[in-house]
Amino acid sequence: MPPIASSPGSMSAADSRTTARRLLGAHLTGRGVTLRITEVEAYAGEADPGSHAFRGRTPRNEVMFGPPGHLYCYFTYGMHTCCNYVCTAPGEAGAVLIRAGEVIDGAELARERRHTDKDRELARGPARLTVALGITLADNGVDLHAQGAPVRLHWQEPVAQELVRTGPRVGVSGPGGDGETYPWRFWIDGDPTVSPYRPAKPRRRRAG
């Protein structure tokens, strides 16, 4: 797997699956809380029906088209914000959904935001993670490697290969559009903060 630069000045674009694997173990800091990323999902832009960029560029997904190293945030189910790490070259769309993490600093503040004292649940799932870090739609487009940014990413040593597991994305069919699933979800084996897997629901065909 090609190395991914650790400093903002040398950050380069990479395939979303390569970046997803590399993000495991990285630290994400938001407004007084830091977590260690334990679960992610890769999305391949216009080649991927599961991606917000599948049907092309729109005002909503503009950040996904680069430059890399920025935060793409979106609102889902009318109540939740989720966040992604943009990783492909400008003009291309590719991002990694940050699904779960272990809070390693600022746990008390995360508990207040999440209204729970169960530490494994603080950032176990993409919507819980953004709440714990204080991330909102206003953070869409933030440069995660800029000094003074409200949300920042810090690369760490890669997680050992024997601890990395892959499988289908949660609730998403594969890029073929035919329901086939691809192992584009990456997580740290045995980590209690990894979210539970739920397969995509098959679409019902309307009666002729």
Image (cartoon, helix red, strand yellow):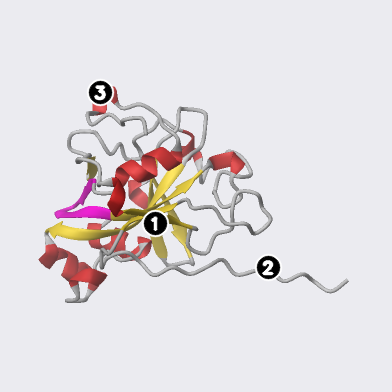
Residue at image point 35% right, 66% down: 195
Q: Nearer the viewer, residue 16 or 162?
A: 162
Percent from the top left, x then y, of residue 62? 49, 39
Nearest to viewer (mark 3 / mark 2): 2
Q: Could you tell me which secondary element the residue under label 3 belongs to? A: helix
User: Which element carries disc 1, helix, strand or loop?
Assistant: strand
For marks 3 and 2 on the same chain, the one whose residue lies earlier in the sequence:
3
Residue at the spot 31% in from the left edge and 44% down from the top edge: 23
Residue 192 location, quadrant: bottom left
Indicate which disc residue 190 carries.
Answer: none
- Dots 3 and 1: beta carbons under 8 Å? no
Q: Which residue is mark 1?
A: 82
What kind of element bears circle 2? loop
Q: Residue at x 26, y 71 (%)?
A: 121
Q: Residue 115: give x, y in percent of width and height.
A: 22, 75
Q: In the rendered structure, find residue 9 and report the number of the disc placed on it.
A: 3
Residue type pointed to by label 1: Cys
Q: Quadrant of the N terminus?
A: top left
Q: CA distance from mark 3 to mark 2?
A: 45 Å
- Position of residue 192 relative to residue 90, above or below, is below
**Outermost residue toward the top?**
10
Q: Is residue 58 at least partly visible in the picture?
A: no
The quadrant of the rendering that contains the C terminus is bottom right
Q: Which residues are magenta?
A: 26-37
Q: Which mark is residue 203?
A: 2
